[in-house]
Amino acid sequence: MSKMVLELTIEEKKMLKGKQGKATRKAMEIVVALGEIYGAKRLIPVSSVQIAGVSYDNLGEAGLEYLNEMAEDGQTRVLTTLNPAGMDMVEWKKHGISEDFAENQQRVVDAFEKMGVVTTCTCTPYLMGNLPHYGEHIAWAESSAVCFANSVIGAYTNREGGPSALAAALTGVTAEYGFHLDENRVAQVKYDVLADLMSTDEFGLLGQIIGNRTGKQIPYITGIGNATTDELKSFCASVATYGGIAIFHMEKVTPNRTPIPEKTEIVTEEDLNKARAELDDKEANIDFISVGCPHASIKEIAKIVDMLKGKKVTEGKTVWITTAKPTKDLAIKMGYYDQIEKAGAYLVADACCAVAPLKGRFTGLMTDSAKACYYARGKNKFKTEIRTVEECIKEAVS
C-alpha cells in the first residue's frame, strides 16, 4: 500500500523552508508532522485559533522558554485567543496569589501578546468575539470550547495541544484530518435521556455519565427539549473532561447532520443521582465556593448578583465567580462587580479554579461544575460537592 503524501502549496513550502522566519518554520514543521502522522492529504486554512496551556502552574519554565523562543519572530496570521491563566491579571493580589507566581504568569501572557495573540484568557472564546460560524475550520485547544464549537456551533476543529494550536496561529493552517472531515463526525451511540434537566449542574452530571460510558465514541442525544447556552457549555465541559469527547449531536438542539445510531443507551433520573453521589464527598468541609467553570456569562453573573443582594459571605469561606476579562468589564459597568465585592465574594477574571495555584489553600469545594470537581480532586486534593448555583450561593452566605 502506497503511503499517503501530504501536498503543500508554494506558500506552505516557503514557510517550511524558513523563508518567513524561524518561528514560522518551527510551527510549520509541527503542522506538517501531525498531517503526516494522521495521513492528511493537505493543509487547510483556519479562521481562528484558541490556545490552551496558559497558566504558569501548568507551563513552568520549560514551557515559557519555548514561548519566548517562538515570540522572537513569530506573528499570528488569524484571530487567536487564550485559555485561562492562573490568576486575575489585574487583581491577583487580593485573591491571595504570590508575587513570584504573578510575575511568571505575566511573562507568559507577555510572550503571547508579543506574537499578536488577543490575551483574553478565557475558556469560552465564543462568548468573547472568537465566534466561528457553521462549517468553518478552526484550530482550538481547550477541550470544552472544542466540544462546543464542533457540536453547538457546527464548526470544524480537532482538539489541538498547546504547541499545535500555536503552530496553527503562526501559519494560518492546520492538517485536514480527524474532525475536519465529515466522515469522522458521524454519531456512533444513541443516548435517550429519560430525565428532566433543569440546571447547569444537571447538564454537567449528564456529561459525566455520557463521558464515562462512551469513551471517545460520538454520542447522539435525544430527550432534551431545549437547553440554554450556559447549560450547553456546562455539558460540553463535562463530557469532554470525563470522556475526551470532542463532538456530540443533540436532537432538536444542535445542527445535526448524522444518521441516528442503532446502539442505544438510556439515562434515567437514578443515573443522575448516582453521578451526583460520586462527586459528593460526605466529609467535605466547604471553605471554597466557585462558579464559572467554564467561565460565567454576563447573564449568570446578573443572576448571582440577585442572589447575593443584602447578604454577606460567611467568615471562613471564599467565593470565586470566574469569568472572562471583557465580561468582568461589563459587570463593572453594570454595577454587578461592586455588589459582588460588597457581599464579600470575588469576581475573578482571566483565571478559574481548575488552573489557578490553589493546592493547600482550601479543603472543600462546592460548585455547579462537574469539570471543576474533577480538577479539584485530581489536582488540588479538595473534597467536593456539586450543587445548583442557587445552592452554592446559599452555602456561601448561610
Image: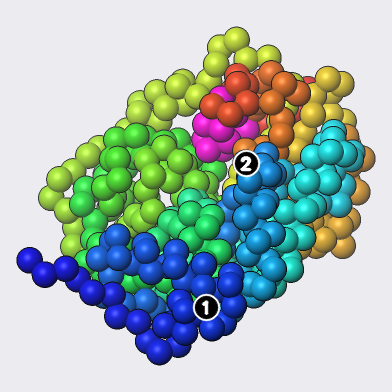
Residue 306 image offset from top left, x and y in percent = 78, 45
Give the residue type at disc 2.
Asn
From what the image shows, is residue 282 above or below residue 307? above
Residue under the image location 52 percent in, 58 percent down = 163
In the displayed structure, 237 sits above or below 392; it is: below
Specify the amino acid type for callout 1. Answer: Gly
Rate crowding at label 1 as few (under 14), some (14 to 19) or many (20 or more) other CA atoms within 10 Å: some
In this rendering, position of residue 113 left or right of residue 96: left
The image quadrant that residue 8 belongs to is: bottom left
Q: Position of residue 194 (x, y in %)?
A: 31, 39
User: Is residue 3 on the magenta stretch?
Assistant: no
Residue 385 visible in the picture: no
Q: Which mark is residue 18?
A: 1
Position of 337 relative to 320 (above/below): below
x and y percent of residue 355 in the render? 65, 40
Q: Nearer the viewer, residue 57 or 185?
A: 57
- Quadrant of residue 324 within the rendered picture: bottom right
Q: What number is the disc on residue 106?
A: none
Other residues around mark 2 within 10 Å, as few (<14) / some (14–19) / many (≥20)? some
Over which residues does the magenta segment extend?
367-377
| Residue marked by disc 2 | 58
